[in-house]
Image: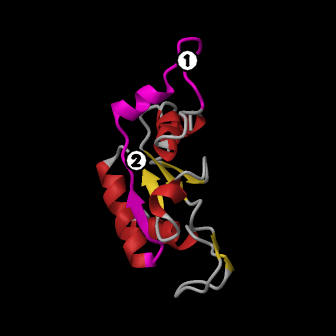
Amino acid sequence: MVHSGSLQTHFHDRSGNLTGAIIISLGHEYAGYFTADEGLSAALYKAGDQSGDKVWRMPLADEYDKLINCDIADMKNVGGRAAGSITAAQFLKRFSNDVPWVHIDVAGMVWSDKEHDLYEKGATGFGVRLLDRYVRDHKG
């Protein structure tokens, strides 16, 4: 994320699983996403709605950021059990360098034990349709 600021990117996407804690919040129906950018949030939600890759915005706030403060280092890389997915995103936010960014936590969505309208049992490919739709809507 730090390097992307030097590349003059329009935004930085970090999709993946940081903690697995998002499954506690959203189960296997939605991927949680974190961003401080309102325009990016609206566009990503719309892309999710259109693509079928359902996403739900999760909070970023100073109250959560304080959970990764540390007396003996710049910050902790773990915030504890409470708000685990949120504190993981707060950790990423500290490296964003004013580049619009989004973290899409796909932990609950990358594998399915049952068939779905969009995918078979097994690996789902979640996020490909979502980001394809986002890029198509914002090309140029």
Name the residue located 40 percent from the left edge and 69 percent from the top edge.
47
* Residue 3 percent across, percent down from the top left: 59, 35
Q: Judge the density around disc 1: few (<14), some (14-19), many (≥20) Cα neighbours within 10 Å.
A: few
Start-end of magenta stretch? 51-77
Q: Judge the density around disc 2: few (<14), some (14-19), many (≥20) Cα neighbours within 10 Å.
A: many
Q: Which residue is mark 1?
A: 74
- Colour mode? secondary structure
Name the residue located 39 percent from the left edge and 77 percent from the top edge.
50
Look at label 2 and name its amino acid.
Thr
Q: Secondary structure at mark 2?
A: loop
Label 2 close to label 1 by CB (< 8 Å): no
Name the image quarter holding residue 51.
bottom left
Q: Which mark is residue 87?
A: none
Q: Which residue is mark 2?
A: 35
* Residue 83 percent across, percent down from the top left: 46, 42
Q: Is residue 28 above or below residue 25?
A: below
Marks 2 and 1, how far apart in space? 22 Å
User: Is residue 33 in the magenta section?
Assistant: no
* Residue 22 percent across, percent down from the top left: 51, 54
Q: Secondary structure at mark 1?
A: loop
User: Is residue 69 in the magenta section?
Assistant: yes
